[in-house]
Image (cartoon, helix red, strand yellow):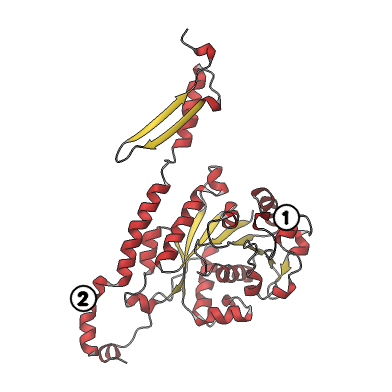
Amino acid sequence: MALLDYFLRKKEKQATTASKAKERLQIIVAHERNSRNKQPDYLPQLTADILEVLRKYIKVTDESFSINLDNKGGDLNVLELNIELNDEHSMN
Amino acid sequence: MARIIVVTSGKGGVGKTTSSAAIGLGLALKGQKVVLIDFDIGLRNLDLIMGCERRVVYDFVNVINGEATLNQALIKDKRVSSLSILPASQTRDKDALNKENVGKVLEELGKIYDYIVCDSPAGIEAGAMMALYYADEAIVTTNPEVSSVRDSDRILGMLASRSRRAELGLEPIKEHLLLTRYSPKRVDDGEMLSVEDVVDILSIPLLGVIPESQAVLKASNAGEPVILDTESDAGKAYQDVVDRLMGETVDFRFLHAKKKGILSRMFGG
C-alpha cells in the first residue's frame, strides 16, 4: 500500500487543508486591509497643501475647515471640503 | 541611540515571551547591552522564562510611580552581565502605563542600552498599544495557523497607524516576521501553512523560522532561555535570528523535514 500511496500523493496535494487555509486567509486579510485603509496616506499632506493655498487669500482657522474622503459605495469616492467663511469674506 | 524592538503578535500563546527571552539573551551574548521589558502588566511571565522570578523586588509600575529608581527595579542577568530585565507589575491596574511616563523610562534606558526589547502582551488593548508605541522595529511572532496569521495582520495595521512613528509621520516601524512552532513534516503533508504561504499573506520580510521543538518547554521549565540550548534546533534557529538582527546574512535552516530514503518512502517505515 505504501507504494500506491507514494504515487497517489501528488494528486491529493491539491485539496490539502493547508491550501484551504491559505485561500481563506488571503480573502479575509485582503478584505480587512481594505476596510482598514479607508483614508489614503496622501490625505494629511493634501490637507496641509490646500490650507496653505487658502490662507494666501483668506483667513481660515483649523476649526472652520474640514476635509473628508468618503466612499459612497462601489467605485464612487467623494472628496468633501468644507470651509466656513467669516464676515469679512462674505459676499456683501 | 538604542534600537527599540517590540515582540508582538496579537494572538496569545504563540511564543512572544519565549522569543523575547531568547533574542534578548542572544543579543547580550554577542556583547550588546540589552534590556528586556515585560509590558504584560498584571500577567508577568518574562521573569519566569528568564529564571529570575525570585529576584523581583520592584517593577515597571513602581518606576513609573516614582516608588523605585530604574536601577532598583532592573534585574541584572546572572549569566550575561550586559543583560537586564525590567519586570512587569503583578497586581496594579493596567492603566498605570501611559505614553508620557513610558516614554520617559525608555529615554532613560536608551542612554545606557543598545537594545530595548519590549515583550508585548497579547491582544490589541492599551498594554499592547503601549508596547508598540515607541518601537523602531517589530518582531511579529506568528504560528503557521489561520487565527495567528490573521491577528498578526491586524497588528501590522496597528504598527502602521497607532505607533509614534506613524503619528509623527516618521519612517515606519521596520517589520520582521518570526514564524514559530513550525513543523516541516506537517507542511510537506499539506496540513500546515508553509513559510512561503505566510510570507505571501503578510508580505513582510522573514526574520526567522523556529521549528516546533521539545527544547522550548524544557527551557521554560528550567528558566534558561532556549537559545542557551545550543544543541537544539530551536536554539540554533534563535541564534540565526539574533545574527540576522545584527546584520549578518544567515541561510534559513529547519525548513524541510529530514529526508527519508526513497526505499523507506515507497515501502513505508
**Residue A23: x %, y % from top left:** 31, 62
Query: Dot 1: within a 10 Å radius of its alpha carbon, few (fewer than 14), some, or many (20 or more) residues?
Result: some
Q: Nearer the viewer, residue B206 or A79?
A: A79
Circle 2 chain: A
Q: Which residue is mark 2?
A: A11
Q: Which residue is mark 1?
A: B64
Q: Nearer the viewer, residue B238 or B161?
A: B161
Judged from the image, the secondary structure of the residue bearing numbered disc 2 is helix
Query: Dot 2: within a 10 Å radius of its alpha carbon, few (fewer than 14), some, or many (20 or more) residues?
Result: few
Q: Residue at x 32, y 74 (%)?
A: B190
Q: Amino acid at mark 1?
A: Ile
Of the 4 image quadrants, the one containing the C terminus of chain B is: bottom left
Q: Amino acid at mark 2?
A: Lys
Q: Is residue B68 left or right of residue B15?
A: right
Relative to B171, residue B233 above or below: below
Image depth: mark 2 or mark 1 in front: 1
Mark drawn on residue B150: none
Instruction: Find residue B203 and report its image quarter.
Output: bottom left
Q: Residue at x 39, y 31 (%)?
A: A79
**Residue B44: x %, y % from top left:** 64, 67
**Pointer 2 with pointer 1, Cβ within 8 A:** no
**Residue B80: x %, y % from top left:** 68, 73
- Marks 2 and 1, Cα distance to the nearest angstrom? 60 Å
